[in-house]
Image: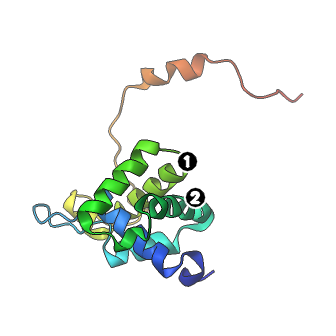
Amino acid sequence: MTEQAVLSADERRGLAGFAGVMIPASAEYAVPGADDPAIVADMVSTLGRDAPWVRAALQRLDALAEGCFADLPEARREDVAHRLREEGGAALATLCRVVLQCYYRDDRVLLSLGIEPRPPFPKGHVLEQGDWSLLDPVRQRASMWRRVE
C-alpha cells in the first residue's frame, strides 16, 4: 500500500498538525517537532494496522474543529487537540503512540538524548537494573492458561 492510499492529503496534514501540537520543535534542545516532514513520512509509511484508529482520531479532530483541523490557526489547533485529549479513547491512544514511536526513533532526537542512533544489535544496549519486586504481584497471580497434558 502506498503512502497516498493510507491517508488522504488532508489527513496527512491533520496528522502533522496534531503531531506538532503534541511535540513542538525545540531550539533549546535543537530537535525538530513531531510535525517535521521526515517524521510525518515515517508515521504515514509505518501505520499498518493502526491506520483505521489513526484515521478515526483525525476525523474526530476535524469534527471538533468543525472543519479541517489542519487549516486552523496554531492556537485553535491546540484547543481542539486538548478537547480530544479530554475525550480520550482508543483512537487517540493509538494516534499518540504512533506519534511518539516515530518521533523517538528519529536520529536527531536520539542524538539530542545522548543515544547513538543505531540498531540494537550487534552491540546491544545497556539497560539499568530496576526493582524486580515490582513483578511480584504478576508472579503470584494464578495461571491464565489451561495446562495441556
Circle number at residue 62: none
- Image quadrant holding the C terminus, namely top right
Relative vertical location of residue 43 with respect to residue 79 in this rendering, above or below: below
- Residue 100 drawn at (x, y percent): 39, 57
- Residue behind mark 2: 53
User: Does the rendering let one see residue 128?
Assistant: yes
Q: Determine contact: label 2, label 1, CB under 8 Å.
A: yes
Q: Quadrant of residue 24?
A: bottom left
Between 148 and 113, the residue placed more toward the observer is: 113
Say few, some or many: other residues with alpha carbon within 10 Å of mark 2 (under 14 / 14 to 19 / 20 or more): some
Please provide percent x and percent y for residue 86.
41, 43
Could you tell me which residue is drawn at 43 percent across and 54 percent down?
96
Furthest-left residue in view? 28
Is the residue marked by circle 1 packed among few (<14), some (14-19), or many (20+) residues within 10 Å? few
Percent of width and height locating residue 46: 52, 70
Q: Foreground: 12 or 49?
A: 12
Q: Amino acid at mark 1?
A: Ala
Q: Residue 90's mark?
A: 1
Looking at the image, residue 57 lies above or below residue 136: below
Q: Quadrant of the N terminus?
A: bottom right
Amino acid type shown at disc 2: Trp
Give the mark nearest the N terminus, 2 or 1: 2
* Left or right: 143 in relation to 139: right
